[in-house]
Amino acid sequence: MRELKYAILGLADCSPVTGYDITKCFNASLSKFWDAKHSQIYPELHRLLEEGLVEYQVTIQGEKMEKKVYSITKKGREELLEWLRKDSDIMAVPKDTFRLRLYFGDRLTREELSETLNRQYKKRKSRFIYLESRKQATSEAAQDKSRYQREYMLLCGGILREGAYVKWLEECAEFLGIELED
């Protein structure tokens, strides 16, 4: 299933967007739970155009630079709503390179394993702290506006996910007798 299709339709349904705007939104907001690269977004936009789910207008930025501003069509909105109303299957376990490395970690020296655990711990702890700060910044706005309410709920989920990962790393380190550095 082309899940990226629905992410782009959802963004275009919020407001007209450029391909750059879509990429920016993935990097800022959606990356907390969904990933898409610049190289995936533009081909998907082209398919959505071919299917009649989005349309665009060319606008001039500056003196000469043209940009395409995409908006959802009626057909696109109907398809988005149909997808939103469907039940979701439980996704396969996402790939996690760190866990794969840990699985084969017996080939590392104790120092290398300690460094590997500490690097991942610092990254995860940093992401956890970042999400916590975003939650605090979003909580007041979430009282009034539905878009911020959805972002707040997703931040809460991300915080639980990252918090559990940090806790798991702490348990791994304790089990292995490795000291984690903050």
Image (spheres, rainbow, N blue to C red):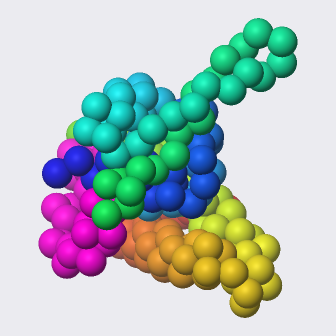
Residue furthest to the bottom = 143
Residue 122 visible from this viewpoint: no
**Where, quadrant-wise, is the C terminus in this rendering?**
bottom right
Check the image and name the residue furthest to the front.
Answer: 74
Q: Is residue 101 magenta?
A: yes
The one nearer the camera, 88 or 17, is 17
Count all numbered tags in the image, as a single digit. 0
Position in image of residue 101 (x %, y %): 29, 45
The quarter of the picture where residue 142 lies is: bottom right
Residue at the outermost top position: 64
Q: In the shown orientation, is residue 132 left or right of residue 172? A: right
Is residue 82 shown left or right of residue 31?
Answer: left
For the point 28% across and 31% down, which residue is it?
50
Q: Residue 165: image x %, image y %?
A: 43, 69
- Would residue 89 be visible to someone looking at this image? yes
Q: Give percent across and percent down for residue 68.
A: 58, 28
Q: On screen, 46 above or below 140?
A: above
Q: Does residue 84 show up magenta in the picture?
A: yes
Residue found 71% across the figure and 69% down from its top:
134
Residue 42, image x and y in percent? 42, 28
Determine whether 19 is above or below 100 in the image.
above
Q: Residue at x 21, y 75 (%)?
A: 86
Range of the magenta residues?
Answer: 79-105
Along the line of sight, the residue nearer the viewer: 181 or 75:
75
Position of 81 with respect to 179 (left or right) is: left
Q: Does 150 sit above or below residue 116?
A: below
Res 152 quadrant in image: bottom right
Residue drawn 61% across the image and 80% down it: 146
